[in-house]
Structures are given as C-alpha cells and as structure tokens.
Image: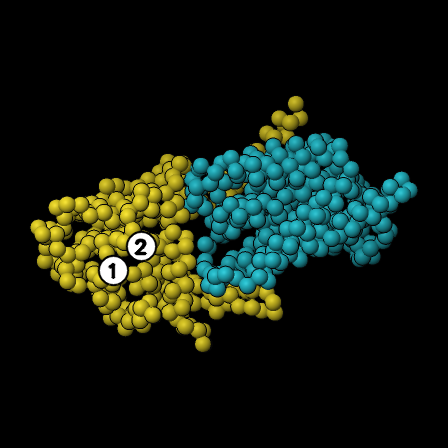
Chain colours: A yellow, B cyan
C-alpha cells in the first residue's frame, strides 16, 4: 500500500524535481570521506566495498544519517511474460530512459521515519525515484507495476541494496554503523556484476524530517592492466580484436593437434 | 577465480576448464563442434547469453581447427564440398549476426534461441536415436549393418551438377550452398558450430560417404565460427578474450582425448548416446517455455 502511494507521488514529484537532485542550501557541514576513491579492477576482481566515514556535526547527535551510493543512470527495458498458445513469451515492453545501474541506500532507521515521501522522491533516496519512463505503457498495464518490477529485478541481481538500521550490519553485506560522538560508517558491497563506471557516494543529514546538509563524494571504478587493454581493444578496435581472437583460436587448435600427435 | 573483462564477472577457472574439457571430449568423440552444449552451459554458469554465444564460437573455431588437422592427415576432408558449404556459410552467418542484433534489440532473442534449440535438438535427437537403434538391432540379428540410404535425392536432380571426387559424388551445387547458408545463420544466432545438424544432413541429404563427413563438416564449421567471432566482435562487442582462452584450453584438450576414444568405439553407439543427450537437452528447453514463470517481468531489449 505504501509503495503504491509512493509510486503515485513519484509521478507528481518527478517532472518537477528530477533535476533538483542535490539541495543547494547547506546549513551545516557534514564531514564525510570514502576509504577508497579509486577502485581498480584487475583479473582477480571479485567485487569490492565502498566504505564511507562521516561525522554528524550536531554535538548532541540529533538528526538522521542517510548514505546513498549511486551508479550512473542508464536506459532499461522491462518486458512482461505473456502466454501465447501455451508458450511464455516476452511482450509489452516498457522503456525507461533513466534508471540507476547501481543504487544502495543506507539509513540509521527506516527511511520513511526519517523523511516524508515527498523528500524521499525529491532527493531520490529510493531507486524507483530515479527511474523515468521513456515510452507509453501498453494499454491496460499498470506503470507502477513496471517500476516495481525494475527495482525488484535489480534487487535480485544485487545491484540495488537497502539497509534501514533494523538489522546488525554484516561484514559481507554491509550496513550503517553509528558510533559515539556522531561518527558513522557506511559499508556498501559492490558486487562483481556492478558496472565499471563513475559512482557517487552521497551523504545526507536529516533533522525532524528536513534535509539539513549533504555531501557528494565521487568514487571511480576502473580497469587496470590486462583487463583494461583487452576491454580497450574490444571497444576501440573491434575488428582487430575479433581477428586476434580467431588467430588465438587457430593457434590453440594447432598446438593441441601437434602435441597430441607426438604423444 | 578470474575476472572476465567483457562479461564483467568473475568465474571459477577450474569449473570453466572442466565444462569446456567435457564438451570438447564429446565433440572429439562424435565430430560435432559441441557449441549446443557449451552455450547453454556457459549461460548456466551465469555468463550473459550474448557473450556466451559469441565467445563460444571462438572455442568452436579452435576445436574444429585442431580436429581438421587430424582429419587432413587421414585424407577425410572433401575440400570441394567444404568450400561450397563455407561459401553458403559465410552468407548465412552474416545474415545471422544481423538477425541476432535485431532480435536482441526486440527482446525476443531468448525466445527464438529456446524454440530453435527445442525444435533442432529434439528432431535431430530422435532421428539419430531411431537410426542408430535400427542399425544396432539389425547388427545383432544378422550381423550386417543396414544403412537405408536411397540412391538418389533432390541433390542429384537439380542443375549445376559437378563432381566431388573424394566423396565419389556427382551432385548439384545448390543443396550444399543452401545447407551451408542455413547452418551459418543458425551458428550465429545459437552459438553453435552446427556440426550436429550438418553431419546428418550431409549423410541423408547429400548422400556423402560417412568417412568424409566429419572432416568436411569440421572445415565448414571452422570457416563459419571464425567469421562469427569477427562479426560479433565488430557488431555487438560480446567476445570475451579471457573466457575464450579458457574455453579453448579445455576444449582442444578434451577434443583430442575424445577423438582417441571415439576411434575405438562403434559409431552407432556414439550416435545413440548423442541422440539421448539431445532429447534430454530439448526437454529442458520445452520445460522452460511452458511452465508458468515465477517472475512475470524480465529485462529486455539490451545486451544484458
């Protein structure tokens, strides 16, 4: 029920505030930093972690902390399975012009207790808030169902994550830990299938439902070494790359035939 | 574990080597490219389907090249026939890669792949099984192998007939060209070499003698799969070099062992085994197509 209400609100809020992602007013500073601003991908890459440290400037520790780690927005298409003479086929495509390729939101208590639905959509603290429809929804289909499906599928892939402070932060799945003196630490697990791109870690301080302060820290994930060379060759000189692969194949076949002939 | 730069995921090196080695073994045993097992196996390991299809082709190229060197020494390659099949295959794989890209964008690639696998695997499987069953039964009864091959087919009546000395045939060039085209198109879309369709077609449609069929089909498979790798690299950029290297390593070693074991086995037993394998695989595709999906919505229309 609440999700549905949120989705309905989204349509009103989206058109007006999609561009206003970052608040311009900043009453207090929110000191925050990431442990690794550069994450490198080499042949032993198995995913990584984004760790954000920060301090709530309020001495009495009032206010709520929300940390969002975002990947770049990309287009996406969601299709619905239809039964066609006994076979389940993909149909009714709905295109999203923009959807976060990665989205992790962490807060010290459930997000809806921290901010109202409008703020959640305005600052895009929910992955569905950033997803913008590009094409018309097929007749009779529910647009919010497609939006929910997009979010659900990405959650299943581990590309969308949320932590609302109710469970203990775990080493492998991450979470938000509050320490004494206003210090907090947010850990986000970046799965290996998360796109290799420019990420942003955004830290928000809410007090009594209002955004007091926020900070954006860029986190870059990039390939290095052999991984980088292979990827660059595949994208920049794709014909050459294909020919190299075939030559490698022929060489492998030739070596094998030669080796096994002798023995 | 090693990270794949194009598929953008880590895989277990030993697992990939084991799978590709197993597929290579079967391919060496029967003389098929093995792509029809390799591609679904890679998808099962979590490799995105387009990457699995395109990268699988490079492993097929390696395996077929290694196989063809062995076959050339045994003089079991009909080069003239292979060339005709390849010319058809080149045109076919070009069209196939184009269609692959179109279907990918429409979000219907998975469906088409499933249906094609279902139809081809089940029909070829049943054909192989029933044929080899009757041979095995015939042999135990009378001790004589009966291959019911009619003397003349459509290949003998169409125009543009030329001689194929190594196969001992005098047939039209149209059926090999059409056959090559069809296999080439299927190879590009399904990530297969096409040997498992090509071999029965050469035996039953073109009436080629069995001893030249494996070598000649390998030649066509080599040409087509090499072309598919280059075209897919250029068109969809889904060929993963690291994954390809792993598949080749496992595939060529497996194929050599398979060829050795295959030389000492009875042909119809191998074919009966492969027939059962194909029917089992097609049952899996049928199951996925008719069972109501748990998740109604899917991603579509993109590379991933």
Chain-order first, disc 2 or disc 1: 1
Q: Which residue is mark 1?
A: A111
Does the image show residue A215?
A: yes
- In this view, the residue farthest toward the bottom is A139
The residue nearer to you, when weighing B61 against A173, is: A173
Above or below: residue B170 compared with residue B15: below
Residue at figure coordinates x 12%, y 55% from the top left: A62
- What percent of the width, then of the height, locates residue A175? 28, 48
In the current view of this chain or complex, which residue is farthest to the top?
Answer: A263
Relative image position of residue B226 (x, y in whole percent): 58, 44
Residue farthest to the left? A59
Label 2 sits on residue: A162
Q: Quadrant of residue B96?
A: bottom right
Residue B28 sits above or below residue B304 on the image: above
Q: Callout 2: helix, strand or loop?
A: strand
Give the left or right position of residue B152, taking residue A42 as reference. Answer: right
Camera-nearest residue between A216 and B63? A216
Disc 2: host chain: A
Query: Badge 2: few (under 14), some or many (20 or more) residues near its Cα, within 10 Å?
Result: many
């Amino acid at each position: 029920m609440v999700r549905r209400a949120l989705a309905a609100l989204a349509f009103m809020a989206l058109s007006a505030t999609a561009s206003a992602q970052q608040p311009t007013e900043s009453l207090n500073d929110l000191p925050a930093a990431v442990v690794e601003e550069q994450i490198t991908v080499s042949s032993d890459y198995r995913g990584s972690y984004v760790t954000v440290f920060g301090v709530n400037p309020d001495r009495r520790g009032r206010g709520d902390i929300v940390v969002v780690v975002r990947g770049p927005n990309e287009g996406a298409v969601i299709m619905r399975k239809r039964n066609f003479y006994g076979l389940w086929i993909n149909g009714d495509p709905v295109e999203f012009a923009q959807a976060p390729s990665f989205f992790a939101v962490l807060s010290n208590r459930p997000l809806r207790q921290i901010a109202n639905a409008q703020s959640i959509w305005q600052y895009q603290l929910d992955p569905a808030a950033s997803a913008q429809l590009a094409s018309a929804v097929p007749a009779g289909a529910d647009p919010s169902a497609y939006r929910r499906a997009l979010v659900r599928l990405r959650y299943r892939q581990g590309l969308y994550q949320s932590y609302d402070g109710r469970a203990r932060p775990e080493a492998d799945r991450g979470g938000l830990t509050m320490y004494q003196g206003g210090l907090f630490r947010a850990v986000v697990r970046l799965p290996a299938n998360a796109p290799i791109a420019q990420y942003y870690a955004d830290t928000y301080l809410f007090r009594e439902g209002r955004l007091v302060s926020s900070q954006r820290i860029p986190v870059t994930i990039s390939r290095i070494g052999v991984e980088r060379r292979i990827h660059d060759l595949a994208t920049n000189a794709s014909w050459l790359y294909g020919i190299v692969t075939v030559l490698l194949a022929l060489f492998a076949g030739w070596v094998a035939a030669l080796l096994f002939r002798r023995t | 574990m090693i990270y794949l730069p194009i598929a953008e995921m880590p895989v277990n090196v030993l697992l990939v080597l084991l799978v590709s080695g197993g597929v290579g073994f079967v391919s060496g045993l029967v003389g098929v490219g093995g792509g029809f097992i390799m591609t679904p196996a890679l998808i099962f390991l979590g490799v995105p389907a387009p990457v699995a299809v395109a990268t699988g082709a490079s492993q097929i190229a390696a395996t077929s090249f290694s196989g063809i060197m062995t076959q050339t020494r045994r003089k079991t390659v009909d080069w003239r026939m292979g060339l005709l099949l390849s010319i058809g295959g080149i045109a076919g794989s070009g069209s196939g890669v184009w269609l692959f890209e179109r279907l990918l964008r429409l979000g219907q690639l998975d469906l088409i792949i499933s249906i094609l696998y279902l139809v081809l695997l089940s029909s070829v499987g049943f054909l192989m099984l029933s044929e080899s069953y009757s041979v095995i039964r015939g042999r135990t009864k009378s001790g004589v192998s009966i291959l019911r091959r009619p003397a003349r087919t459509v290949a003998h009546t169409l125009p543009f007939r030329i001689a194929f000395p190594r196969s001992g045939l005098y047939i039209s060039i149209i059926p090999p060209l059409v056959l090559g085209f069809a296999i080439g198109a299927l190879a590009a879309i399904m990530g297969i070499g096409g040997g498992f369709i090509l071999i029965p077609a050469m035996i039953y449609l073109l009436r080629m003698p069995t001893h030249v069929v494996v070598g000649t089909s390998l030649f066509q498979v080599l040409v087509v799969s090499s072309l598919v790798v280059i075209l897919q690299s250029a068109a969809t950029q889904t060929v993963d070099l690291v994954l390809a290297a792993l598949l080749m390593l496992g595939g060529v070693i497996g194929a050599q062992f398979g060829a050795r074991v295959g030389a000492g086995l009875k042909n119809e037993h191998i074919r009966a085994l492969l027939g059962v394998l194909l029917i089992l695989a097609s049952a899996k595709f049928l199951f996925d197509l008719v069972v109501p999906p748990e998740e109604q919505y899917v991603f579509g229309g993109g590379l991933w």
